[in-house]
């Protein structure tokens, strides 16, 4: 997968592209749906945020390999400006400090029903373990939630993440997007 991404960057470079922002993957072990499936875990199975350690370790390993490939591409494509964006770190910061950033607990899901071992996905009807049929609708105020449906982030969470990324806080090279993209004028 990483080699395919690198080949895509090379192809774009050959066609004249020079500025690239390459994002890594997020902390998949911290997805709210994953957190709902962790019951009384052994401390060795969760990380400092209470997320699935194995899943986050896989994501970190992928991200290390991707960053190595980005560094290789920087050497290989000398006229390029390649920015590596650490989406993992941005999302992990949000998840780890949800209330500080104006959100409810990281495990709360806005749309869907996820209680105990009952899961009814957003917009669906389902029968839960006590025999009750329910409709899994959305919460009253999505702007307070990080997770929309257990897998996807809410608009408010995505906005917070984007603001951090656009400002350059989680980028290597740490520059705002306005300074890393240059418009080419035709004369």
Image (spheres, helix red, strand yellow):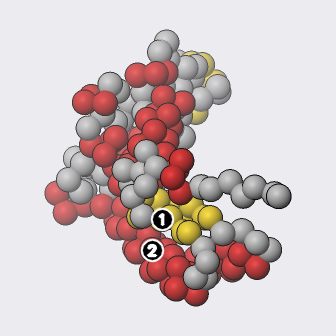
Q: Check disc 2 and report the residue beneath it.
A: 67
Asked if the residue under mark 2 is in contact with the one under mark 1, i.e. CB atoms within 8 Å, the reply is yes
- At x 34% / y 40%, what residue is drawn? 94
Q: Nearer the viewer, residue 105 or 127?
A: 105
Quadrant occupied by the C terminus? bottom right
- At x 38% / y 54%, what residue is drawn? 170
Q: Check disc 1 and report the residue beneath it.
A: 84
Q: Secondary structure at mark 2?
A: helix
Side (left or right) of 103 relative to 126:
left
Quadrant occupied by the N terminus? bottom right
* Relative image position of residue 186 (x, y in whole percent): 81, 57
Vertical arrangement, residue 11 with respect to residue 19, above or below: below
Q: Nearer the viewer, residue 74 or 100?
A: 74
| Discs 1/2, front | 1
Whether residue 89 is visible to the viewer of this picture, yes or no, is yes
- At x 36% / y 44%, what residue is drawn? 35
* Relative image position of residue 177 (x, y in whole percent): 52, 50
Side (left or right) of 103 relative to 151:
left
Q: Of the residues under marks 1 and 2, which one precedes in the sequence? A: 2
């Amino acid at each position: 997968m990483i080699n395919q991404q690198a080949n895509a960057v090379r192809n774009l470079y050959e066609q004249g592209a020079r500025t690239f922002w390459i994002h890594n993957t997020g902390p998949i072990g911290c997805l709210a749906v994953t957190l709902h499936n962790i019951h009384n875990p052994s401390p060795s199975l969760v990380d400092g945020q209470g997320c699935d350690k194995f899943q986050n370790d896989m994501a970190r390993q992928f991200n290390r390999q991707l960053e190595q490939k980005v560094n290789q591409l920087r050497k290989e494509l000398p006229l390029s400006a390649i920015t590596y964006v650490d989406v993992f770190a941005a999302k992990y910061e949000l998840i780890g400090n949800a209330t500080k950033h104006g959100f409810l607990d990281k495990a709360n899901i806005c749309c869907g029903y996820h209680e105990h071992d009952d899961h009814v996905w957003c917009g669906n009807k389902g029968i839960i373990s006590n025999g009750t049929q329910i409709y899994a609708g959305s919460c009253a105020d999505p702007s307070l939630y990080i997770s929309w449906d257990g897998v996807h982030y809410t608009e408010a969470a995505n906005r917070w993440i984007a603001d951090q990324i656009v400002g350059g806080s989680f980028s290597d090279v740490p520059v705002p997007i306005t300074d890393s993209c240059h418009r080419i004028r035709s004369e």
